[in-house]
Structures are given as C-alpha cells and as structure tokens.
C-alpha cells in the first residue's frame, strides 16, 4: 500500500472509488471545482497497485489562539473499501495526517469513527447541538404521508399559523441591527474575524470558491453573504445558504461573526441573517453550535434543538497544546454539506439547466 496526493495521474482510480462511496454529481466541472480548485484542500489516497482503496480529504486553515496563530487540519470524506479494512487503510490514512504535526479538528462522523478516533489519540472537546427554526408548513409537513393536494392545502394553513408561531420569535429583535446583502466577503470585512479566542481566520478566497461551486449543477444551492451594522458601524457579518432537498428549501447559517463577545449582539445578528434567509424563501433555518454563548443566543432567537448531536474531537502533536471547542458552522465540509448528489442537483437546477436562483427581497 502506498499513499499519494490526488492529481491528474491517479484521478481515474479515485473517481471509481468516489462513485462507489458517495452518490454525488460526476461532471468534470464538479470534480474540478471540488478537488482541484478549493483553496487549502488536499485529498490523500491509499493505493493498492493501480486501485484506490481509501481516501481522506482535509482543509488546512489558520486559527487564532489568543495572540498567536497556528495552522490546523480539518479532515472529512474519510473512507476505505470494506475489503481494505483488514489492511487498516483508513487508520493509516489518518496517521498520515498526524505525521504532518499539525492540530487536527474533527466533528461528528459515524459511530465507528467516534469509537476509533480516541484510539488514535483524539480527545473530545465538546458536543455540538443542531438548532432549527421552522418557518413554513412545508417544513412542518415534510415527513407527513398525505396525498399531494391535502398536503398542499394543509401546508397553506400551517404557513399562516407558522408566521404567528415562529416568525415573530425569529424576526423581531430588541437590537436595532441593519442587515444588507453584499456581493462577497472581501478582505476588509473578513478582517473583522471576531472576538479573541480560538477561531479560524476567515479566508475570502474560500468563500469565493463556495460561490463558484453554487453555479455547478446547483446542488450546493446558493450562498448569501451579508453585512450587519449597528449604529452605522459594522457589527457582524455572515453567510447564509439556501438549498432545496426533498421538496423543502433549507436555510443554513454557514458563518456568523460578531465584532465582540456580546450575547445581545449575537442574538441580534442571528435574527438579522434569519430574516434574510426567510425572505429569500427558506422553509427552515438550521445551524450547529458548540459554544455556550451562541447556543444560548440561538435559543433566545426562537431556534429549537433537534435530537442531532456531534462530538467535537481534537488531536494535537503536543499534549500541552490546549484547544477548546470552536465554531463548527463552517468546519471541514459543513459549508457545502450535503454535497452534490443526484437528488439535490435535480432539485436545485431549473429546467433550462441553470442553477435555480432563490428570490431575494
């Protein structure tokens, strides 16, 4: 077994493995965007002869820890063929990442993953909860086994009720914050990276890459960057995402950064970006959080916790290096998960083949 970085020379064996492992889009444009254009991305392969039997991808991002910075690794898409597990292909792929000598940040994964990581020296640093804010009857009835016409009529009734039950809690705030859509998160805006603490330093090139991906088959949906101002000054910025799946328009908060640690400001920023997503057609808004201040702010803004939980895990080359829980909104592939697949590509693409554009008002 040998380990190689993904390139043009071994792309075809990797494509075979990827199409076996994940039901994703298979266009050349998608593969080029996903694996060869992403800033800071590396995909590592485990090769057995000419066969690719395992893979792991990771982003390398710069984090701020107090007054210092450090490069960290965020792995995802960790997979090995069942027949390759007797050779520990998956474990050996992760050990290749550990040899780089940089902190590794992970969150979630299968039960097997959560069981394996401590054996590789990972330690838990917190549990993330998923928060969701229902906005329409379409979302509330997403799993109801009803005839189409009945579902449509009942959804209309619930849409009216939902505007009373849920929308005021999300869209009315005590803080007078102005939220406007901006063309992109430019370096000047990204420079406001948030309050002191352990957090990634935003990279505008990464956000530009996400936006380019939204135009490939439509499966990642659309991204909406916003600037939030208080008293005429920038107080926060964020990125929302809209994607359709199972007939439901899902809104997610990909990033949300405030200028300071302030519970009222965090809640106001949540309400502001939620307003944008709601007016753009979201049936619900969801987000992951492991930070107490932000978790409390989501609850105050009307979000409910779901049963979904994810364990945040960390591996460090030195035991003395302390890394606490961190913002999980955009870690690893969270900003574009669910990834391109056949279902979402069809739902997010208009009949003319152009990615569907949600209405923004």
Image (tube, rainbow, N blue to C red):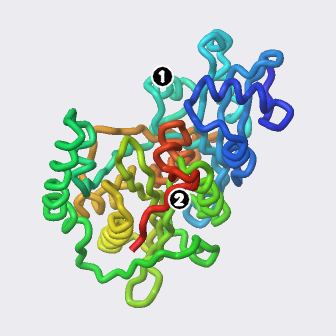
Q: Residue at x 68, y 40 (%)?
A: 27
> Relative to the observer, which residue lies in front, 357 or 177?
357
Image spot of residue 293 (x, y percent): 33, 61
Q: Residue at x 66, y 13 (%)?
A: 84
Mark closer to the observer (2, 1): 1
> Relative to the observer, which residue lies in front, 183 or 260?
183
For marks 2 and 1, give the CA distance. Answer: 28 Å
Judged from the image, the secondary structure of the residue bearing numbered disc 1 is: helix
240 relative to 186 in the view: left or right: left
Image-quadrant location for residue 188: bottom right
Q: Residue at x 45, y 41 (%)?
A: 312
Q: Is residue 102 visible?
A: no
Judged from the image, the secondary structure of the residue bearing numbered disc 2 is: strand
Judging by the rendered image, the residue that carries numbered circle 2 is 199
Image spot of residue 106 (x, y percent): 53, 40
- First of labels 2, 1 by sequence position: 1
Image spot of residue 314 (x, y percent): 53, 40
Q: In the displayed structure, would residue 318 be above or below residue 220?
A: above
166 relative to 294 in the view: left or right: left
Quarter holding the N terminus is top right
Judging by the rendered image, the residue that carries numbered circle 1 is 112
Image spot of residue 51 (x, y percent): 77, 18
Q: Is residue 253 visible?
A: yes
Quarter holding the C terminus is bottom left
Q: In the displayed structure, would residue 35 be above or below residue 291?
A: above
Q: In the displayed structure, would residue 351 be above or below residue 104?
A: below
Image-quadrant location for residue 69: bottom right
Q: Residue at x 21, y 36 (%)?
A: 147
């Amino acid at each position: 077994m040998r380990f190689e970085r993904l390139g043009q020379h071994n792309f075809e064996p990797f494509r075979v493995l990827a199409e076996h492992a994940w039901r994703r889009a298979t266009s050349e444009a998608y593969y080029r965007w996903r694996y060869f254009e992403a800033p800071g991305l590396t995909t590592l392969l485990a090769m057995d002869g000419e066969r690719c039997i395992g893979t792991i991808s990771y982003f390398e991002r710069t984090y701020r820890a107090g007054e210092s910075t450090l490069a960290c690794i965020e792995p995802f898409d960790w997979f090995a063929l069942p027949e390759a597990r007797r050779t520990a292909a998956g474990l050996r792929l992760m050990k290749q990442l550990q040899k780089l000598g940089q902190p590794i940040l992970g969150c979630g994964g299968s039960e097997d993953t959560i069981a394996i990581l401590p054996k590789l020296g990972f330690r838990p640093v917190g549990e993330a909860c998923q928060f969701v804010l229902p906005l329409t009857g379409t979302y509330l009835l997403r799993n109801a086994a009803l005839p189409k016409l009945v579902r449509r009529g009942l959804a209309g009734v619930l849409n009216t009720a939902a505007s009373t039950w849920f929308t005021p809690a999300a869209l009315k705030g005590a803080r007078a914050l102005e939220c406007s859509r901006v063309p992109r998160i430019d370096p000047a805006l990204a420079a406001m990276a948030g309050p002191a603490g352990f957090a990634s330093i935003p990279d505008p090139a990464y956000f530009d890459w996400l936006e380019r991906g939204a135009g490939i088959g439509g499966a990642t949906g659309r991204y909406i960057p916003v600037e939030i101002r208080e008293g005429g000054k920038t107080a926060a910025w964020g990125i929302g995402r809209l994607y359709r799946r199972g007939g439901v328009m899902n809104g997610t908060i990909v990033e949300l950064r405030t200028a300071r640690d302030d519970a009222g400001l965090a809640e106001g920023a949540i309400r502001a970006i939620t307003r944008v997503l709601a007016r753009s057609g979201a049936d619900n808004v969801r987000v992951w959080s492991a930070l107490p201040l932000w978790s409390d702010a989501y609850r105050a803004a009307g979000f409910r916790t779901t049963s979904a939980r994810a364990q945040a895990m960390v591996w460090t080359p030195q035991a003395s290096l302390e890394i606490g829980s961190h913002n999980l909104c955009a870690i690893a592939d969270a900003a574009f998960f669910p990834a391109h697949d056949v279902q979402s590509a069809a739902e997010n693409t208009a009949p003319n083949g152009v990615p569907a554009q949600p209405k923004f008002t």
